[in-house]
Image (cartoon, rainbow, N blue to C red):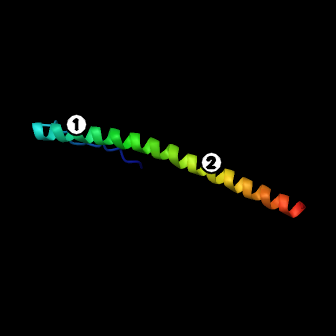
Amino acid sequence: MTLPRRRIIRPTPIALPTPKLERLGERLAAEEKLLHRWMSRLRRAFHAVEKQQRTIARLRKSILNAEALA
Protein backbone atom coordinates (compact mmCIF):
# COMPACT_ATOMS: atom_id res chain seq x y z
CA MET A 1 0.00 0.00 0.00
CA THR A 2 1.37 3.38 -0.93
CA LEU A 3 1.40 6.30 1.41
CA PRO A 4 0.11 9.70 0.34
CA ARG A 5 2.84 12.19 -0.48
CA ARG A 6 3.50 14.70 2.20
CA ARG A 7 3.40 18.35 1.36
CA ILE A 8 6.68 20.09 2.15
CA ILE A 9 6.06 23.18 4.21
CA ARG A 10 8.87 25.69 4.01
CA PRO A 11 9.07 28.88 6.02
CA THR A 12 8.33 32.03 4.10
CA PRO A 13 11.42 34.03 3.15
CA ILE A 14 12.20 36.84 5.51
CA ALA A 15 12.15 40.30 3.98
CA LEU A 16 15.18 42.48 4.58
CA PRO A 17 13.93 44.36 7.62
CA THR A 18 16.84 46.67 8.31
CA PRO A 19 18.81 49.12 6.19
CA LYS A 20 21.99 47.29 7.21
CA LEU A 21 20.77 44.05 5.66
CA GLU A 22 19.68 45.92 2.54
CA ARG A 23 23.15 47.42 2.18
CA LEU A 24 24.71 44.00 2.68
CA GLY A 25 22.42 42.56 0.00
CA GLU A 26 23.40 45.32 -2.42
CA ARG A 27 27.07 44.79 -1.66
CA LEU A 28 26.69 41.05 -2.20
CA ALA A 29 25.07 41.64 -5.60
CA ALA A 30 27.87 44.03 -6.59
CA GLU A 31 30.58 41.58 -5.49
CA GLU A 32 28.91 38.73 -7.40
CA LYS A 33 28.77 40.90 -10.53
CA LEU A 34 32.46 41.77 -10.14
CA LEU A 35 33.37 38.11 -9.65
CA HIS A 36 31.46 37.20 -12.80
CA ARG A 37 33.45 39.78 -14.79
CA TRP A 38 36.77 38.48 -13.43
CA MET A 39 35.81 34.88 -14.12
CA SER A 40 35.05 35.69 -17.76
CA ARG A 41 38.42 37.46 -18.09
CA LEU A 42 40.16 34.54 -16.41
CA ARG A 43 38.43 32.08 -18.74
CA ARG A 44 39.56 34.05 -21.80
CA ALA A 45 43.14 34.23 -20.50
CA PHE A 46 43.17 30.52 -19.69
CA HIS A 47 42.04 29.61 -23.21
CA ALA A 48 44.63 31.96 -24.71
CA VAL A 49 47.36 30.20 -22.73
CA GLU A 50 46.06 26.80 -23.86
CA LYS A 51 46.14 27.98 -27.48
CA GLN A 52 49.76 29.14 -27.09
CA GLN A 53 50.73 25.80 -25.56
CA ARG A 54 49.15 23.92 -28.48
CA THR A 55 51.00 26.14 -30.96
CA ILE A 56 54.34 25.62 -29.21
CA ALA A 57 53.80 21.86 -29.02
CA ARG A 58 52.91 21.75 -32.73
CA LEU A 59 56.03 23.77 -33.67
CA ARG A 60 58.31 21.58 -31.52
CA LYS A 61 56.84 18.48 -33.14
CA SER A 62 57.41 19.98 -36.61
CA ILE A 63 61.02 20.79 -35.74
CA LEU A 64 61.63 17.27 -34.44
CA ASN A 65 60.12 15.76 -37.59
CA ALA A 66 62.22 18.06 -39.82
CA GLU A 67 65.38 17.09 -37.92
CA ALA A 68 64.55 13.40 -38.23
CA LEU A 69 64.16 13.75 -42.04
CA ALA A 70 67.45 15.69 -42.43
Residue 51's label in the rendered image is 2
What SS does tag 2 mark?
Answer: helix
Left or right for 61, reference 35: right
Q: Is the residue marked by circle 2 packed among few (<14), some (14-19), or many (20+) residues within 10 Å?
A: few
Among all residues in the image, which is located at the extreme front? 70
- Residue occupying image coordinates x 83% and y 59%: 65
Instruction: Give, as a three-letter code, the residue at label 1.
Output: Glu
Q: Position of residue 38 (x, y in %)?
A: 40, 43
The image quarter in which residue 59 lies = bottom right
Measured as percent of width and height from the top left, residue 50 is found at 60, 51
Q: Nearer the viewer, residue 48 or 70?
A: 70
**Label disc, if present, on residue 15 of the rendered structure:** none
- Looking at the rendered structure, the number of numbered marks drawn on it comes to 2
Residue tagged 1 = 26
Q: Residue furthest right?
A: 70
Q: Residue at x 31, y 44 (%)?
A: 6
Name which residue lies at 21% across and 42% down.
Answer: 11
Question: Can you say which quadrant of the picture contains the C terminus?
Answer: bottom right
Image check: 19 left or right of 70? left
Image depth: mark 2 or mark 1 in front: 2
Count neighbours of disc 1 (C-alpha within 10 A) and say few if under 14, some if 14 to 19, many if 20 or more: few
State which quadrant residue 23 falls in. Answer: top left
Seen at 76% across and 58% down, the residue is 61
Q: Amino acid at mark 2?
A: Lys
Mark 2 vs 1, N-terminal side: 1
The x and y percentages for residue 51 are: 62, 48
Residue 45 percent coordinates (x, y): 51, 46
Cα gap from disc 2 to disc 1, whole angstroms: 38 Å
Regarding mark 1 in the picture, which secondary structure is present there? helix
